[in-house]
Image (spheres, grey):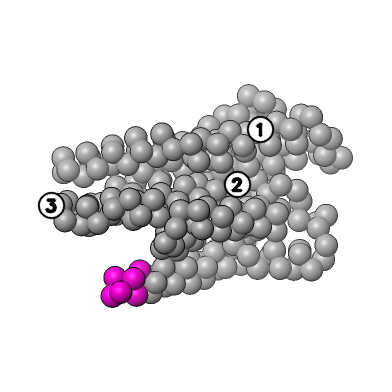
Amino acid sequence: MNIVIAQCKAELLRIFRNPYYVFWSLLMPIVFYFIFTRVVSSGMEDTKLWEAHYLMSMAAFSVMGSAIMTLGIRLVQERTQGWSTFMRITPLPSSVYFFGKMFGQTMMHIFSIILIFLAGYLINGVSLSAGQWLLSGLWLLAGSLPFLAIGTLIGAMKRVDTASGVSNAIYMVFAITGGMWMPLDILPQIMQRIGKWLPAYNYGNGAWEIIRGHSPNWSNVFILLCYLILFMLLSSYIRKKQEVV
């Protein structure tokens, strides 16, 4: 048990010292939230609903970024620097190493969600029921699984700069087509149709439904589950091929 706790603590320290996490997962979403709710006029009739809506968008944007970029780039760095090879020859079981990674990533997501929710309350006085705060937080946490799978897929790349470029591109495309930065309705029809089949929109939409007093659509759950299975299978296949080589 002590070795599990030690590994989890080590992962947490490594994550919170990562500049990618601090910028993409914490600073950038909060700055965006302030700009698009306090500085730039949204033109929305229901200002309070827009402030809550955009808060969920930025929380989803934050978690999505840490799953895709922070995890993916860290995995590539560890492999290129020989850290993952070193860990395999130590007495540390691979299951404990993997558990420590997932624990650290989960704690990172929880911290991001809480901090961004707090920012929404302090900046705009966003007011939701206790159930809505809790359910939206749980949805954002559970719905991040497909993006963690994308992170492990990116982590299979051979070069850090390639992984960084690809993860940035995926992150930006998901943010735009998922309606994170701006409502999907203002985008061209073709982008709207594509976006509704991508994981980012279905991830954000679940939280948007919760703050409106509804449950996430079953289509959101189904599409996210399909992407989770797809990316897990792809990641597993690529890693097995790499081990053979």
- CA distance for labels 3 and 1: 44 Å
Q: Quadrant of the N terminus?
A: top left
Please state which of residues 239 and 6 is positioned toward the viewer in this rendering.
Answer: 239
The amino acid at mark 2 is: Phe
> Is 68 positioned to the left or the right of 106 in the image?
right
Q: Which residue is mark 2?
A: 61
Asked if the stretch drawn in magenta spans residue 240, the answer is yes
**Can residue 141 be seen?**
no
The image shows residue 125, relative to residue 177, as above or below, that is above
The disc, 3 or 2, on the residue closer to the chain's N-terminal end is 2
Q: CA distance from mark 3 to mark 2?
A: 38 Å
Q: Residues within 10 Å of mark 1 (few under 14, many from 20)?
A: few
Give the x, y percent position of residue 238.
Answer: 39, 72
Identify the magenta region: 239-245
Residue 194 location, x and y as percent? 71, 68
Looking at the image, which is closer to me, 72 or 211?
A: 72
Please name the residue that numbered disc 1 is placed on.
31
